[in-house]
Image (tube, coloured by chain):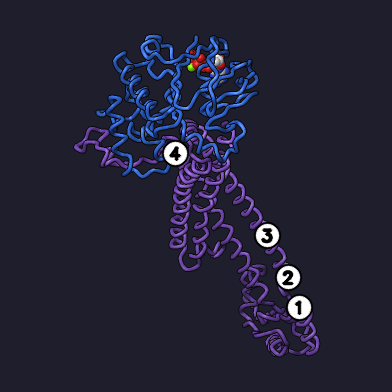
């Protein structure tokens, strides 16, 4: 190909049958390829970004619920002559001995004051108020105790307390996570479908524009499969290249975000991981496969219409 | 035969070309010369009737066997049908490549043939840079390069000067001598007269003076 290109421009090398190399039956380059590669690369880029986003968002939702399900908060109200701290200590002790609890820790009084200070303002004698104490409970990751079990354990010790196992939050977060995920998957599927459609459409258009090649090869006695394969390889290569560019761009952006986001990923809200970048790998392969299938389909139909 | 839902462009045609024969087909423009050739080189199907080649019905031959049949037929198309992204040499070598031959086995033959048709200086040129007559000569080279059993040429000398026309005719005669059955559609009455070969005259899709029936294997059944 290249030596012929040279001699064609009247370069040093002169043509002889001995230095002739059979040229590909299909032109290697086509002016239409540029726009096809651009559009497919952009769509692949977007599809890869969405895929990585969906994966990261999925992990984020799992992380939030995991943190929340692993913990419960108990609000202890002192009863009778007991001091709040003593009540909290008793509650912590009771909870620690409960099955499904790995740790129960009475928080310092200041933590409780910090929580209510915004509502009361900076009252100087805040410490004199009978403020409930908090007990932070870390649940056993495998078999977490539920709110009822915690309540029962506290009631047994005669502690007046309210158990918050975050179940309301978890439900909300699960729902929000599900919505984000469904949305992400939908967007991803739409973009992927658009990319596939563009690849298929461009392949068909490109093939129709090369009808002359199909016709000449067909009449010269080339097998249908041979002709179809030429187009398959040709368009799979173009689409694969476009997919590679798009996926590469998305991966590069992913690396950038990961580095810029520091240890916690992009932000704590979207914990982007190095492994998420691997999601771009199938992209060029899928693009190439779609193009190959479209080329095969179109070429076979084009040939079948010929006598 | 007909194109789509159009009128019959060939009808009541019954002709047989003996293997190794050499015929011309003439007739006014639109008479159906190209259509007749298309039937034979399997680029068109008759709406009715039969086409026999190499002793067999090729209209109803399974699609999988047609490539093999097509490789035995060389065609000079009226509109050349060269591939513009391939060099002259690549265009000429195309039938050999499709037949699965090795470049080392045929590169010198292709070069020799291109030299014979006067394209030795243009072997690495692109067809778009060729003159009309040069394109036609390339189309001829491609048609004969594989030593086909049947050669069909549609106006092969329409764009070349008389001297080149004679030269090309000699190429056809040489091929015919080696056993190729030849059918040439042309308006070139002088060439026909000088050749002394039999002529089929087509008019309105029918043969005007009926040629003597000849035996198979290259035969056409009645067309309507
Ligand atoms: N692809 C086509 N679609 C529809 N009609 C066609 C097609 N090709 C040829 N025809 C019609 O078929 C008839 C015969 O055409 P054909 O090309 O066989 O004539 P021809 O004898 O080769 O003419 P010429 O000497 O001008 O090449 C004409 O009426 C033409 O209009
Ligand atoms: Mg014609």
In the rendering, which numbered label is found on residue A178? 3
Residue B183: x %, y % from top left: 46, 21
Viewer-side label of 2, 3? 3
Query: Label 3, label 1: how many angstroms apart (C-alpha)?
Result: 24 Å
Tell me the element at label 3.
Answer: helix
* The colour assigned to chain B within the rendered structure: blue
Query: Are circles 1 and 4 on residues that touch, CB within 8 Å?
Result: no
Q: Are marks 2 and 1 in contact (CB under 8 Å)?
A: yes
From the viewer's side, name the closer residue of A187 and B62: B62
Sequence-wise, the earlier of marks 3 and 1 is 1
From where the camera sits, is residue A137 visible? Answer: no
Relative to A116, is B22 on the left or the right?
Answer: left
Q: Identify the chain of the residue marked 2, using the numbered disc in the image.
A: A
Image x and y of residue A108, in percent: 62, 83
Q: Residues within 10 Å of mark 1 (few under 14, many from 20)?
A: some
Q: CA distance from mark 4 to mark 2?
A: 55 Å
Q: Secondary structure at mark 1?
A: helix
Q: Label 4, on which residue?
A: A33
The CA distance from mark 3 to mark 4 is: 40 Å
Give the drawing colour for chain A: purple
Looking at the image, is mark 3 or mark 4 earlier in the sequence? 4
Alpha-carbon distance for marks 2 and 1? 9 Å
Classify mark 2: helix, strand or loop.
Answer: helix
Crowd class of label 3 (few under 14; some 14 to 19; many from 20; radius 10 Å) = some
Q: Is mark 2 within 8 Å of ligand 1?
A: no
Position of A97 relative to B189 (above/below): below
């Amino acid at each position: 190909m290249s030596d012929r290109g040279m001699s064609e421009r009247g370069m040093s090398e002169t043509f002889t049958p001995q230095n002739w190399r059979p040229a590909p039956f299909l032109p290697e380059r086509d002016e239409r390829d540029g726009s096809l590669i651009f559009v497919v690369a952009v769509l692949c880029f977007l599809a890869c970004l969405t895929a990585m986003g969906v994966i990261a968002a999925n992990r984020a939702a799992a992380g939030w619920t995991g943190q929340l399900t692993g913990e419960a908060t108990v609000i202890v109200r002192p009863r009778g002559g007991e001091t709040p701290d003593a009540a909290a200590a008793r509650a912590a002790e009771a909870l620690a001995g409960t099955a499904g609890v790995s740790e129960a820790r009475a928080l310092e009084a200041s933590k409780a004051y910090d929580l209510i200070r915004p509502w009361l303002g900076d009252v100087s004698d805040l410490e004199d108020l009978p403020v409930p104490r908090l007990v932070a409970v870390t649940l056993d990751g495998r078999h977490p105790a539920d709110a009822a079990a915690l309540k029962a354990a506290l009631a047994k010790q005669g502690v007046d307390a309210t158990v918050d196992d975050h179940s309301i939050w978890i439900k909300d977060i699960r729902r929000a996570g599900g919505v984000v995920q469904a949305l992400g998957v939908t967007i991803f599927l739409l973009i992927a479908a658009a990319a596939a459609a563009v690849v298929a459409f461009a392949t068909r258009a490109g093939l129709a524009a090369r009808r002359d090649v199909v016709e000449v090869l067909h009449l010269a006695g080339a097998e249908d499969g041979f002709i179809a394969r030429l187009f398959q390889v040709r368009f799979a290569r173009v689409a694969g290249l476009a997919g590679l560019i798009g996926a590469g761009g998305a991966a590069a952006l992913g690396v950038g975000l990961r580095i810029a986001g520091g240890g916690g990923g992009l932000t704590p809200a979207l914990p982007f991981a190095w492994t998420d970048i691997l999601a771009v790998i199938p992209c060029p392969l899928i693009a190439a496969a779609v193009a190959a299938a479209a080329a095969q389909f179109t070429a076979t139909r084009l040939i079948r219409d010929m006598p | 035969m007909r194109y789509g839902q159009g009128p019959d462009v060939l009808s009541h045609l019954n002709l047989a070309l003996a293997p190794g024969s050499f015929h011309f087909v003439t007739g006014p423009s639109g008479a159906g010369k190209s259509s007749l050739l298309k039937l034979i080189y399997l680029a068109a199907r008759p709406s009715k009737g039969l086409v026999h080649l190499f002793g067999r019905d090729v209209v109803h031959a399974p699609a999988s066997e047609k490539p093999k049949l097509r490789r035995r037929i060389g065609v000079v198309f009226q509109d050349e049908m060269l591939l513009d992204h391939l060099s002259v040499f690549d265009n000429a070598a195309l039938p050999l490549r499709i037949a699965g031959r090795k470049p080392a086995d045929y590169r010198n033959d292709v070069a020799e043939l291109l030299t014979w048709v006067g394209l030795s200086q243009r072997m690495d040129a692109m067809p778009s840079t060729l003159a009309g007559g040069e394109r036609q000569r390339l189309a001829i080279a491609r048609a004969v390069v594989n030593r086909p059993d049947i050669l069909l040429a549609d106006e092969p000398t329409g764009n070349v000067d008389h001297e080149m026309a004679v030269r090309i005719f000699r190429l056809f005669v040489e091929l015919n001598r080696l056993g190729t059955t030849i059918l040439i559609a042309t308006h070139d009455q002088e060439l026909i007269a000088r050749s002394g070969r039999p002529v089929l005259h087509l008019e309105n899709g029918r043969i005007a003076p009926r040629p003597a029936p000849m035996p198979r294997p290259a035969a056409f059944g009645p067309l309507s």
